[in-house]
Image: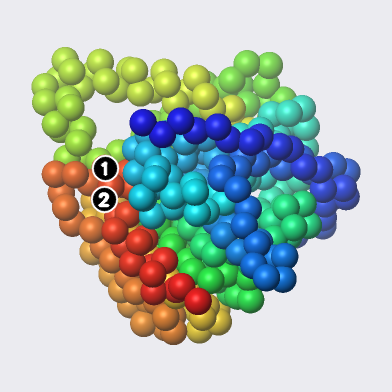
Amino acid sequence: MLELQPVSQTFSIPNFEFGSGETLPQLQLHVQTLGTPQTDGYSRINNAVLILHGTSGSGDAFLAPHFAQELFAPGQPLDLEKYFIILPDNIGHGESSRPSDGLKASFPKYGYHDMVKAQHQLVRDHLGINQLRLVMGTSMGGMHTWMWGYLYPEMVQALMPMASVPLEIAGRNRMLRRMIIDAITQSPDYDDGNYAEQPFGLTAATHIVMLMVGSPYQLQKLAPNQKKADKMFDQMVMGFRGRFDANDLLYQFGSSFDYNPEPHLEKIVAPLVAINAADDLVNPPELKILEALIERVPNGRAIVQDDWPNLQGHRSHSFAKLWKHHLAELLEQSES
């Protein structure tokens, strides 16, 4: 089994200005890296891969065996002997600056553009990388990947957004997010974000998160009767609630307000493979949004996986064995 030894660093961006006009004197960005940078004949790093996590997650998500062992091991698509892997914690997540650090509801209101801007500064200014061999991401990270494609087209050689669509958050997706936001802010003990203990509404918000990421097929298989379903439900609620802070979660699910790549799809020129799952509640395949919009991406291809016994709902993006062959094809296609 591959033994991972990530290098952990925290960079500070002084006077970071958010799209809201607010400023944070020191924005702390935590990042983990794997592998070794390689350079071309002009001393430019040419093997960097940026992998972006989902809402409420962190770069740690990509160190789990069902992701890392399938991608980073010798002979796998992102073999650490060949690639330099960058795993940042986005604004408001992981060990990067977030409301729960102390500012609570006074933390600047951030959006996806702020998060991608900070990623860009991390890669270019702190890591000294001007070209990314690949940008890929899961869920929120997938949406950020679409944005990289049109905001920094000169920097990306290939793109793989997963569990996402390049369209403004609307319909059921937006309503699910509102359920999370309202459950927290309308909780009587939320106290405008100044709670001493996690508010009661965090539990209801957790229920919605579980619904969003769950797979009906897998849940039925793992909990085939009422007793097992109730036991599993209680364990899941305890696990989710134990790692969430209400202000952090509120900001995380609200940050998609400025996301809408749809008007910019023609600007995405790098080879792109978008992968969704047929049992994803967040991105319902029956709407066929991905298939319609991919036609406007010059070098884009869309895949909706329907291997039902192995799909994991919205979280299929984290089980690399399901889609790593598509990544290998993309890397071969985009080789310069």
Position above or below: 222 against 145: above
As helix, strand or loop, the secondary structure at mark 2 comes to helix
- The circle on residue 312 is 1
Horizontal side of 305 relative to 99 (left or right) equals left
Which residue is more in the foreground, 67 or 25?
A: 67
Residue at screen point 36% across, 82% down: 295
Residue 57 horizontal/vertical position (percent)? 52, 38
Residue 281 horizontal/vertical position (percent)? 30, 50
Name the quadrant of the N terminus. Answer: top left
Cβ–Cβ below 8 Å for labels 2 and 1?
yes
Please give the residue where the numbered disc 2 appears in the rendered image: 322
Farthest front residue in view:
41
Quarter of the image for residue 19 reads bottom right
Residue at screen point 69% across, 56% down: 123
Q: CA distance from mark 2 to mark 1?
A: 10 Å
Residue 120 horizontal/vertical position (percent)? 69, 59
Residue at screen point 42% across, 80% down: 299
Residue 244 is at least partly visible in this image = yes
- The circle on residue 293 is none
Residue at screen point 74% across, 38% down: 10
Horizontal side of 311 relative to 68 (left or right) equals left
Q: Residues within 10 Å of mark 2 (few under 14, many from 20)?
A: some
Q: Amino acid at mark 1?
A: Gln
Residue 107 horizontal/vertical position (percent)? 75, 39
Q: Amino acid at mark 2?
A: Leu
Horizontal side of 238 relative to 128 (left or right) equals left
